[in-house]
Amino acid sequence: MRKQIAAANWKMNKTLAEGKELLSEIISADFQLTESRHVLFAIPFPYLTATSELIKAKTNMHITAQNCSNKTSGAYTGEVSVSMLKSIDINYCLVGHSERREYFAESNAILAEKVNLCLAESISPVFCCGEPLSVRDAATQNEFVELQLKESLFHLSADQIKNVIIAYEPIWAIGTGRTASAEQAQEMHAHIRSVIANQYGADIAENTSILYGGSVKGSNASEIFSMPDVDGGLVGGASLVATEFIQIINALK
């Protein structure tokens, strides 16, 4: 079975004390993580080491970086390199989140560089893709997302792509008042899997975890995760509330 993943993205929220309290409440809850069920916590950079200490005895829980530089080292004040992340035992990193694309002008080419650096350090990229409202309204979302995948991932070998997790974010359904249905999520996830199959074969496609990142909450997680091609969620606001995120974890297949 593909890995089923509940990924929390704290974004730029919480002090260290607040983050520790939130994480402690979540990890002490009564839920079962089997071999195929994993939880990722994408934590702000200053807290990566401290939060790693809290989960070091836990199985299938992983502290994750929210971003990395596309440079290896040098005069890039404020940036964090992949080798820095690896030196503190970080094994997962978000790449290409919609906010990074929008606010920091990260192109598909830049994201390809980040993916390469992550894989070179044995860090699994959680590669984010998805279309804005104008693209959805034009009904060209499949082509838009396919181009993101091709330009940032499809230079990888078959062995490399096996280490990439994909997260689909329908940007048009986040903070716009419009809601993506579970069926719409399934439609795009199935398309992404078919695009991967065309490039790398059905076996790799069937074993690629594809997460949904469109306002997942405790109240809708079970319905969304029940879709055959949805392998969990990349969760923003709801991951900052322990009871909500616990409910989301319990909704995993």
Image: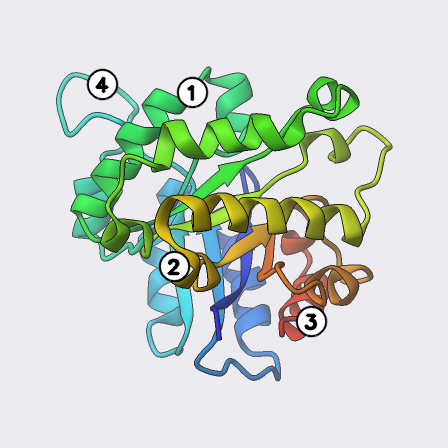
Is disc 3 placed on a helix, strand or loop? loop
Q: Which mark is residue 251?
A: 3
Q: Which mark is residue 106?
A: 1
Query: What residue type is disc 4 on?
Result: Tyr
Mark closest to the chain's N terminus, 4 or 3? 4
The residue that label 2 is drawn on is 204
**Circle 1 Cα neighbour tier, 10 Å, few/some/many (<14 / 14–19 / ≥20):** some
User: Between 213 and 155, which is closer to the camera in this rendering?
Assistant: 155
Mark closest to the chain's N terminus, 2 or 3? 2
Specify the color scheme: rainbow
Query: What residue type is disc 2 on?
Result: Ile
In x, y percent, where is residue 201? 38, 54
Q: Residue at x 39, y 78 (%)?
A: 59
| Real-space CA distance between mark 2 and mark 3, rounded to the nearest whole angstrom | 25 Å
The residue that label 4 is drawn on is 76
In x, y percent, where is residue 26? 58, 69
| Real-space CA distance between mark 3 and mark 1, rounded to the nearest whole angstrom | 32 Å
Residue 3 in view of the camera = yes
| Real-space CA distance between mark 2 and mark 1, rounded to the nearest whole angstrom | 27 Å
Query: What residue type is disc 3 on?
Result: Ala
- Single out the mark in the foreground, 2 or 1: 2
